[in-house]
Image (cartoon, rainbow, N blue to C red):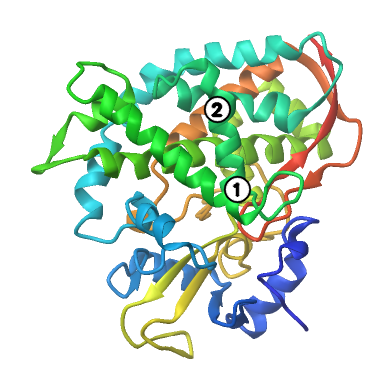
């Protein structure tokens, strides 16, 4: 079977499950040629993705960053200051500085604000029977939540989302722009984060930016330049992953009305259902690492400097780990999916995304009596982001 993991066109109909299943069975450490001439190893099995995720000494996130495409030098320098592109020892203190803002207690305190935002989002479309669910519902909540946490002025929320979309969906002609525009979006977003950090340094605020820029952890204080990169990561991840989770999760429920009914009647089952939505929809196809030494994955020798891609959207359907992986089962337990990655780079906002999704569905069920598709959904053309750009629906207010 001919497999091309790189070509974004191969993801325009969702996860190419048949090809990924073939890779797991026949070529689990697959060599993929890159259009620029280099290549990379693609790991499709859960166990191999887990191995590389845990071995942060043998596989670097910092060497070349986490994408398979080479970044321009100025963007690469900034990207390496994002937590997802840092190796120890730099990674630890900064991650701990951020993670203190995402504790269970702080998320519990944040829930009323998330719920209020969700209600505002629902209210905006209650009088509109047909909408693009992705833009009008699923996308508005995460943008509003992360911008509220960062106390970004409301008139900047649309720009934050546009910068985010350019960086994550640049390969889609409907969402992205030219290479120069995508490059500029990353620089502009980082510059904005730097300027905000400069304004709030020692200003006594209690928003997330002020708390991060003014605290010291293990003798390390977050610099304005570090925060500029961290700002890009927080806002991009805060937008993209949750939007994909909510819209794709709702799509699966619309295809299974009985499950939708069960969750309406028993919303206490939502947390477990959201785990299955995460496994099934897998908002991010992959992240890359670079081997720091000669090693081996399975039967395949890996040379120092080789690029290695952890294909989460294959690992989440590994038959060796998940019973009946092609069944959408909201009672699945255990559910060791990798939608948020694994190891030291486990997504910082994982529990925030879970909270947002749960609150979204609770408030949606309270606001609308019914939802049905009014057209076919359209996927983002991307080998990185898995999600819809269009999902036309018809709403019936409660």
Q: Position of residue 356 (x, y in %)?
A: 53, 27
Q: Is residue 54 left or right of residue 371?
A: left
Q: Position of residue 235 (x, y in %)?
A: 47, 36
Q: Please identify, in this view, whether the residue under mark 1 or under mark 2 is nearer the observer.
A: 1
| Image quadrant where residue 26 sits | bottom right
Q: Nearer the viewer, residue 70 or 354?
A: 70
Q: Residue drawn 64% across and 24% down?
A: 361
Image height check: is 157 above or below 83? above
- Where residue 143 is drawn, which disc sits there? 2
Q: Nearer the viewer, residue 221 or 29?
A: 221
Q: Is residue 285 left or right of residue 304?
A: right
Q: Position of residue 13 (x, y in %)?
A: 80, 56
Name the N-terminal-most of marks 1 and 2: 2
Q: SS for tag 1? A: helix
Q: Is residue 310 left or right of residue 245?
A: left
The quarter of the image holding the C terminus is top right
Please tell me how crowded label 2 is: few (under 14), some (14-19), or many (20+) other residues with Cα within 10 Å.
many
Q: Tell me the distance, in whole angstroms, between the alpha carbons under discs 1 and 2.
A: 21 Å
Q: Position of residue 295 (x, y in %)?
A: 36, 86
Q: Is residue 338 left or right of residue 13?
A: left
Please tell me how crowded label 1 is: few (under 14), some (14-19), or many (20+) other residues with Cα within 10 Å.
some
């Amino acid at each position: 079977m001919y497999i091309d993991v790189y070509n974004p066109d191969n993801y325009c109909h969702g996860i190419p499950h048949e090809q990924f299943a073939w890779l797991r069975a026949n070529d689990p450490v697959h060599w993929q040629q890159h259009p620029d001439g280099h290549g990379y190893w693609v790991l499709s099995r859960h166990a191999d993705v887990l191995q590389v995720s845990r071995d942060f000494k043998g596989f670097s996130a910092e060497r070349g960053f986490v994408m398979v495409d080479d970044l321009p030098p100025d963007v690469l320098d900034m990207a390496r200051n994002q937590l997802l592109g840092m190796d120890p020892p730099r990674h630890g203190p900064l991650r701990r500085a951020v993670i203190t803002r995402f504790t269970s207690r702080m998320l519990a305190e944040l829930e009323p604000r998330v719920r209020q935002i969700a209600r505002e989002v629902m209210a905006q479309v209650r009088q509109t029977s047909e909408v693009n669910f992705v833009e009008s519902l699923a996308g508005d909540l995460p943008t509003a939540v992360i911008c509220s946490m960062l106390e970004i002025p409301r008139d900047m929320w649309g720009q934050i989302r546009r910068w985010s979309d350019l960086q994550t969906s640049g390969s889609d002609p409907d969402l992205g722009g030219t290479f120069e525009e995508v490059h500029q979006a990353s620089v502009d977003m980082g510059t904005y984060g730097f300027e905000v950090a400069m304004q709030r340094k020692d200003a006594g605020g209690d928003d997330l930016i002020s708390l991060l820029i003014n605290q010291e952890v293990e003798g390390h204080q977050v610099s304005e330049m570090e925060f500029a990169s961290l700002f890009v990561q927080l806002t991009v991840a805060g937008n993209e992953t949750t939007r994909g989770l909510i819209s794709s999760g709702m799509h699966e429920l619309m295809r299974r009305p009985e499950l939708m009914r069960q969750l309406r009647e028993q919303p206490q089952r939502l947390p477990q259902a959201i785990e299955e939505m995460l496994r099934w929809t897998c908002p991010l196809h992959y992240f890359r690492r670079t081997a720091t030494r000669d090693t081996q994955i399975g039967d395949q020798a890996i040379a120092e400097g080789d690029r290695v891609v952890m294909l989460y959207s294959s690992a989440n359907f590994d038959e060796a780990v998940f019973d009946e992986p092609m069944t959408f089962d909201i009672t699945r337990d255990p559910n060791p999916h990798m939608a948020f990655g694994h190891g030291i780079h486990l997504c910082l906002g994982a529990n925030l995304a879970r909270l947002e999704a749960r609150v979204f569905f609770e408030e949606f069920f309270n606001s609308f009596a019914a939802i049905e598709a009014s057209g076919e959904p359209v996927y983002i053309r991307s080998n990185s982001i898995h999600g819809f750009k269009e999902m036309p629906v018809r709403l019936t207010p409660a």
